[in-house]
Amino acid sequence: MSIWTRGVVCAKTRTKGLSVLYCVVQSPVKTNGLHELRWRTNRRRISIYAHTSRESSFRHANGQSRMTIRGFHVWGYKKQSSNVSEDTISQRYSDPVTLMKERGLIQGVTNESISSAAQSSDTPVYCGFDPTARSLHVGNLLQIVGLLHFWRCGHSIVALLGGATASIGDPSGRSTERPLLDHAQLALNTASIEHQLQSLLATGMRHIVRKKYGACTPLQHLSRGGEPPEDLPTLTIANNHSWHSKMSFLDFLRDIGRHARVGTMLSRESVKSRMDQAEGLSFTEFSYQLLQGYDFYYMNAAGLERDDPEAQPIKVKVQMGGSDQWGNIVAGVELIRRKRALSSSHSKPADSSSSPSVDTDETWGVTLPLVTTATGEKFGKSAGNAVWLDSNMVSHFDFYQFFRRTPDSEVERYLKYFTFLPLSEIEEVMAEHAKAPNLHLPQRTLAAEVTEMVHGPTALRAALLKTRLLFDSTQTDADGIATPLTSFPPEDILAAFENDPRLARLQKEAVVGQEVVRVAASAGVAKSKTQALKLLTSGGLYINDTKCTDETRRITDTDLIGGRVIVLRTGKSNNVVVEVL
């Protein structure tokens, strides 16, 4: 079938401004699930990948200068319209701050000019992570998401390890002084979190590309199956120990301390809240804001080296952190301003040549809201309710279940905070939830999106399978057809229960040919044969989701899933997976 239509496309490009293209569509060719329609314009030939959403991606015939126009799409026959949307196309860079504000992710910004700057050039952002434990937790997850929002808008991101600052301890949000870590433990924590940050951010990036959440042309190109473009936004992992260790205490006081004002430092909330307490605040903690301020100054002035030695260093322009970091972030912005003012007035001391020259561009601070529990408590290690991001400390299943148990009062906010789902999709999910709250669609969506973003699709599949086995024997597929337990591959079932106490291993002779009640007791789903028999007679013993009512029933080869696995259950959710050896 051929599709003929005549239309007007208004496209804003970075170099041409507003262009009006009169187009004719012909000869649709389906490519990667989309329809490629060749449009012949009054000036050049381009291709459009058209689909039923409100977003269409255009490509010049020579394969370059990609763009996306929102609000205009072609599907089937469409007459010429005089009311074509003139929405801004996706560009090489887009504004992450406005996007995050729409999701309630911005608590404060030092200067609103960041939005216009982010649309025209790379605006590198950094967020710091002090390695005070061997793993990050969900309290840190919002900072990870914040970095990924900048990345999906085309900007370079930097995750800064506080190898130096963690040896002191940040007083922000603390009522008591942090215990000092010994150097050996700090080194172990730093190595662990460096690896974790690399893994978390890389997994999050793949998630954005796979789910087509990119908001800049290089990522949209990659999501369509194209080759990785050279201008993909970059990720850098740095450690502030590398520059703090090169500066003596006297140099720090002379080059940095002289620009700090004690009155301003005393006015920080993290300082005032501690000064009124009996324990007070040590000089070590009081100095923390200066060290963090110097981090921002150093990465803005000297920059961070890229993998390509011929490329220019990354000059960080934005610092991002939780709302409790506002004072420390402002300290960095002020330090850069004072150093800049000193440099521009040519009054820099002759012996301060060791200080790098400051970038003349503007710098910004951005804070994110703190994530709290339903009772208003802060998520974090100190509160005793940490949900770790390390799968060796919190399993994929338990991580999934944590978000799956989100109360209705919080789930819409968490969908905006922790996922990259478009707001329109979140509205649809919540509308469906209002119609059928018993299905818990928002909670399922939240848990699936966050688990995939943090741990990847394989981990999500394992968590979903384990949820199906333990809690949801009535789970259906997309067509509403019940999914039988025996349809799952045995290796997937075993992988889902790896390192789980609900996985039992029994020799084949102890299973096949044996009474069900004996196997139930041996596997631990019942305390004894007697208890297993009582459960059976009351209708509470199941083999692979099938109720067992025959007291003389024995396990046969046909009961084994894939010849290797059998699932025993008592009640609604007391499951044991038996691997038959």
Image (cartoon, helix red, strand yellow):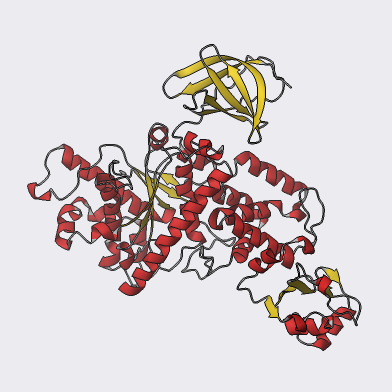
Q: Decide if residue 115 is in sight here.
A: yes
Which residue is painted at 82% across and 83% down in the image?
514
Residue 465 point in image, percent of width and height: 69, 62
Q: Nearer the viewer, residue 541 or 557?
A: 557
Residue 190 point in image, percent of width and height: 37, 65
Left of 294 or right of it: where is 512? right
Residue 330 point in image, percent of width and height: 33, 49
Which residue is painted at 82% across and 74% down in the image?
557
Q: How many marks?
A: 0
Q: Nearer the viewer, residue 578 or 465?
A: 578
Left of 417 or right of it: where is 109? left
From what the image shows, is residue 280 above or below residue 268? below
Q: Residue lying at the far top in this picture: please name it.
A: 42
Left of 412 or right of it: where is 262? left
Which residue is painted at 58% across and 52% down in the image?
414
Q: Nearer the viewer, residue 331 or 53?
A: 53
Which residue is painted at 78% across and 55% down in the image?
476
Quarter the N terminus occupies? top right
Residue 34's quadrant in the figure?
top right
